[in-house]
Image (tube, rainbow, N blue to C red):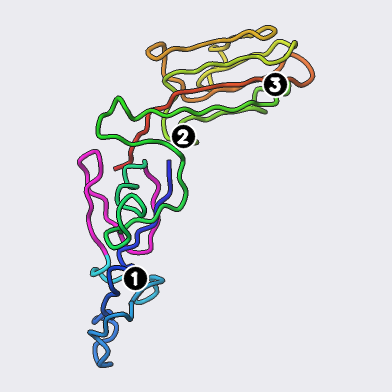
């Protein structure tokens, strides 16, 4: 999942008026270029002038409050710069998980992988696909890179384990099962293993 910040006000679009509810008699209402509630401190919240509802990919609407952040799939990058010109952008990408988003669901898959250093405790190497990548792995390959045998555990279930001897590889193809978590451990000492997964982007809105 990526993190986004709402930017309803940006210099390419012009700045907004002062909040009339917090500046009713100062005579400053209407001064374009003097933002209000930029830090959400005026009356504890931003004015409703700086909030919008935007349609998400799952036909639901997300309330976007200027300056706030939210975590979701990269659908929202289509409203950020440089995907769109600065004068049309109202979303800022804070952190990008590198995933793709397409209106064609079958295209919403991306690869993840790593080489792990293992110890003898399964709790020492935990790959939580849902928490880290926003969805379960649809394909998974695990390879033992050393001469010491390793044990793998799926989905946090101690009854769902597999073992790999020297340089052996285990593959779970799409449709075999949904893999939410992978834990790995070596039989003795320390060793290393690599994994590659295919994950489908999921959205919160």
Q: Which residues are magenta?
A: 51-72
Tell me which residue sits at (49%, 29%) in the image: 129
**Image quadrant containing the C terminus:** top left
Task: Determine if the magenta segment contains residue 93.
Answer: no
User: Residue 43, how many percent across, how many down?
Assistant: 34, 76
Disc 3 secondary structure class: strand
Which residue was labeled with disc 3?
192
User: Residue 100, how many percent across, how many down?
Assistant: 37, 36
Identify which residue, 22 or 196, lies in the foreground: 196
Tell me which residue sits at (70%, 26%) in the image: 117
Say which of marks 1 and 3 sits in front: 1
Q: Earlier in the sequence, mark 3 or mark 2?
A: 2
Say which of marks 1 and 2 sits in front: 1
Which residue was labeled with disc 2?
133
Identify which residue, 136 or 76, lies in the foreground: 76
Q: Quadrant for residue 65, please give it.
A: bottom left
Tell me which residue sits at (55%, 27%) in the image: 113
Q: Residues within 10 Å of mark 1 (few under 14, many from 20)?
A: few
Q: Residues within 10 Å of mark 2 (few under 14, many from 20)?
A: many
Which residue was labeled with disc 1?
11
Give yes or no for contact between labels 3 and 2 (Cβ–Cβ under 8 Å). no
Q: Earlier in the sequence, mark 1 or mark 2?
A: 1
The vertical placement of 48 against 63, above or below, is below
**Number of numbered discs:** 3
Tell me which residue sits at (41%, 30%) in the image: 135
């Amino acid at each position: 999942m990526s993190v986004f910040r709402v930017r309803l006000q940006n210099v390419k679009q012009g700045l907004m008026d002062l909040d009339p509810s917090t500046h009713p008699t100062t005579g400053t209402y209407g001064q374009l270029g003097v933002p209000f509630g930029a830090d959400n401190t005026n009356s504890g919240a931003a004015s409703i002038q700086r909030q919008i509802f935007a349609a998400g990919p799952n036909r639901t609407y997300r309330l976007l409050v200027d300056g706030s952040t939210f975590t979701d799939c990269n659908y929202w990058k289509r409203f950020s710069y440089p995907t769109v010109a600065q004068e049309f952008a109202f979303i800022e990408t804070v952190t990008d998980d590198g995933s793709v988003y397409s209106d064609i669901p079958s295209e919403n898959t991306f690869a993840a992988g790593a080489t792990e250093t293992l110890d003898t405790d399964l709790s020492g190497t935990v790959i939580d696909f849902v928490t880290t990548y926003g969805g379960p792995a649809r394909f998974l390959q695990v390879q033992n890179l050393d001469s010491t045998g390793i044990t793998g555990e799926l989905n946090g279930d101690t009854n769902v384990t597999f073992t790999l001897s020297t340089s052996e590889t285990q593959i779970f193809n799409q449709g075999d099962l949904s893999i939410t978590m992978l834990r790995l451990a070596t039989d003795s000492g320390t060793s290393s293993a690599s994994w590659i997964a295919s994950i489908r982007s999921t959205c919160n809105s």
